[in-house]
Image (spheres, rainbow, N blue to C red):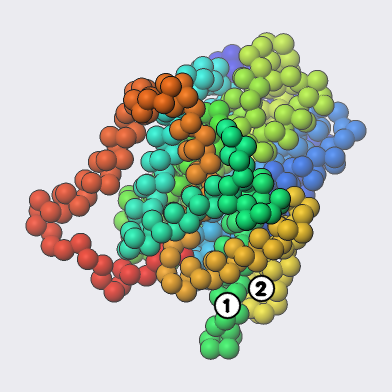
């Protein structure tokens, strides 16, 4: 109850007409910058952080919270409308959200993303209020073997469930893991797959890879078929969620929140793994499996909730331990320090007023995000009424701008073109895109945690099963992969061959 009273004090200091105006401005600015393809919430926050300079701490925090949540929602908007993830955690939203948009349900996809963001962000922030100290102490005890096991579970499960052809899925995964090897070896400093180019000494930016595969690959595919297909204007559809949409979304919102928050609270975690796992869970639990890959609303609601809950969860290690586990959290840490906040175990005792004002500001910013952006969903959806040549020309422009802005390096534009051509080839041969992106994201993390585990044990493989959580995850992987075929065989369910209808891949 003490936490609720402190949160109430924070709300009392944060709520005023002037502060609410700053929050609304932050939400609008964050959304408008976040919708630029390739920008993402981290860059939106970095670009707009100077706007808060000169404000008092309370005003700066509430405007900063609006920018933070607005940038996250803006990244989801580009994923749904333009098939262009602004960050790696928005990849799952693009898979089903863009298919919904093409079916004339863009407004519903944007609305379920907004409502899911609000629910997950609110519950996640309340989770920080009540559970930050306890979760922080648990998170510190999770070691490299468990991290490696969880990352391996994400890789195996996503590759196994996407598409009818597991061979094509593992081909895409192999490509992604190979791309993730580019750069200097962390232990020896030896260059890997750099092709003699100094620009490839650093790991490839995931945003450049994702924007190239999704946005540029989509634009090239449309251009290749433009003359052979009639010009169509995508309908906007009904402006708000219907009763059936609400019924199908509330479960994924809650499950996504439950998955995302603990992963965000784990140092060195992030939103990618819970969004992937949320998509898998909803694909298994849905009563409409035929819609997955063709615009299932559960595939938007669950991952979006997981993404936002994870973003709220990152405040646990940030405030309780002083560990920024994502790029956005790193920028937030810099903002905190500029106002004299030094995150760590004693933060809530030494500066309670600033901390509770920050948490209250996050709740206010999250609420205003819903109030402002839910009515705007049909307006955003009208972008799809632009004729395809003009629409994809704009996508190419902003995608190139976003790729260049990540490192301000013209070489990234060349990489964007290379990955765009790769995305086109993958669509041509029916190879699913998601395992590739997953390999690029989680491959380096798996390598790092595997090396940490083996280093601690002097190279003994037994270290990989030295933690109970890791053993549980490995058992789950075996059951999830080998269980369904074994059950079908025991039941005499016939051959596992792919039918022509199931042969179409999720691209």
Q: Secondary structure at mark 2?
A: helix
Q: Is residue 256 left or right of residue 162?
A: right
Query: Relative to the observer, which residue lies in front, 337 or 5?
Result: 337
Identify the residue at image location x=68%, y=68%: 395
The residue at which mark 2 appears reads as 392
Position of residue 351 relative to residue 30, above or below, is above
Position of residue 347 relative to residue 152, above or below, is above
Residue 332, picture quadrant:
top right
Position of residue 236 relative to residue 151, above or below, is below
Residue 222 is labelled as: 1
**Residue 32 percent coordinates (x, y):** 74, 55
Query: In this orientation, does residue 15 appear?
Result: no
Q: Residues within 10 Å of mark 2 (few under 14, many from 20)?
A: many
Position of residue 207 relative to residue 449, above or below, is below
Q: Residues within 10 Å of mark 1 (few under 14, many from 20)?
A: some
The single residue placed furthest to the right in the displayed view is: 54
Residue 333 is labelled as: none
Identify the residue at image location x=33%, y=59%: 166
Q: Is residue 436 left or right of residue 19?
A: left
Identify the residue at image location x=23%, y=46%: 482
Q: Secondary structure at mark 1?
A: helix
Q: Is residue 31 left or right of residue 440?
A: right
**Residue 255 percent coordinates (x, y):** 42, 41
Chain-order first, disc 1 or disc 2: 1
Identify the residue at image location x=45%, y=47%: 276
**Residue 248 percent coordinates (x, y):** 40, 53
Q: Is residue 470 left or right of residue 13?
A: left
Query: In this orientation, does residue 488 appear?
Result: yes
Q: Are marks 1 and 2 in contact (CB under 8 Å)?
A: yes
**Structural distance between the alpha carbons of marks 1 and 2:** 8 Å
């Amino acid at each position: 109850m003490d936490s609720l009273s402190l949160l109430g004090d924070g709300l009392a200091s944060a709520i005023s007409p002037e502060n609410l105006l700053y929050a609304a401005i932050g939400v609008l600015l964050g959304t408008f910058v976040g919708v630029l393809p390739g920008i993402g919430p981290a860059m939106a926050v970095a670009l707009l952080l100077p706007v808060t300079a000169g404000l008092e701490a309370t005003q700066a925090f509430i405007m900063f919270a609006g920018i933070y949540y607005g940038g996250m929602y803006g990244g989801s908007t580009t994923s749904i409308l333009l098939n262009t993830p602004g960050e790696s955690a928005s990849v799952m939203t693009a898979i089903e959200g863009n298919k919904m948009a093409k079916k004339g349900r863009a407004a519903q996809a944007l609305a379920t993303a907004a409502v899911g963001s609000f629910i997950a962000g609110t519950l996640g922030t309340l989770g920080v209020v009540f559970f930050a100290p306890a979760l922080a102490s648990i998170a510190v005890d999770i070691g490299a073997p468990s991290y490696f096991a969880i990352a391996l579970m994400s890789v195996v499960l996503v590759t196994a469930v996407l598409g009818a052809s597991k061979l094509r899925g593992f081909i895409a995964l192999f490509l992604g893991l190979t791309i993730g090897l580019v750069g200097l070896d962390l232990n020896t400093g030896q260059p890997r797959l750099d092709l003699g180019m100094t620009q490839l000494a650093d790991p490839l930016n995931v945003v450049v890879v994702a924007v190239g595969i999704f946005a540029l690959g989509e634009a090239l595919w449309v251009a290749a078929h433009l003359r052979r297909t009639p010009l169509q204007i995508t309908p906007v559809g009904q402006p708000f969620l219907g009763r059936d949409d609400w019924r199908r979304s509330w479960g994924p919102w809650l499950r996504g929140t439950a998955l995302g928050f603990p992963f965000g609270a784990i140092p060195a975690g992030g939103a990618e793994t819970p969004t992937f796992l949320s998509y898998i869970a909803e694909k298994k639990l849905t009563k409409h499996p035929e819609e997955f890959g063709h615009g299932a609303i559960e595939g938007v609601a669950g991952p979006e909730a997981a993404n936002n809950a994870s973003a709220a969860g990152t405040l646990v290690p940030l405030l309780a331990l002083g560990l920024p586990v994502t790029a956005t959290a790193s920028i937030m840490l810099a903002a905190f320090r500029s106002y004299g906040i030094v995150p760590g175990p004693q933060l809530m005792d030494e500066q309670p007023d600033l901390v509770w004002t920050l948490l209250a500001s996050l709740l206010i910013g999250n609420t205003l995000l819903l109030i402002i952006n839910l009515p705007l969903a049909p307006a955003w959806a009208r972008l799809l009424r632009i004729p395809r040549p003009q629409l994809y020309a704009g996508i190419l422009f902003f995608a190139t701008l976003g790729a260049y802005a990540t490192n301000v390096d013209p070489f990234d534009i060349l990489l964007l073109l290379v990955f765009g051509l790769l995305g086109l080839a993958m669509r041509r041969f029916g190879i699913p895109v998601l395992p590739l992106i997953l390999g690029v994201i989680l491959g380096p993390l798996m390598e790092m945690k595997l090396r940490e585990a083996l280093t601690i044990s002097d190279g003994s493989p037994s270290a990989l099963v030295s933690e109970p959580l890791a053993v549980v995850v490995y058992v789950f992987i075996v059951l999830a992969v080998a269980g369904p075929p074994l059950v079908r065989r025991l039941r005499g369910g016939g051959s596992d061959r792919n039918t022509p209808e199931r042969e179409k891949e999720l691209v």
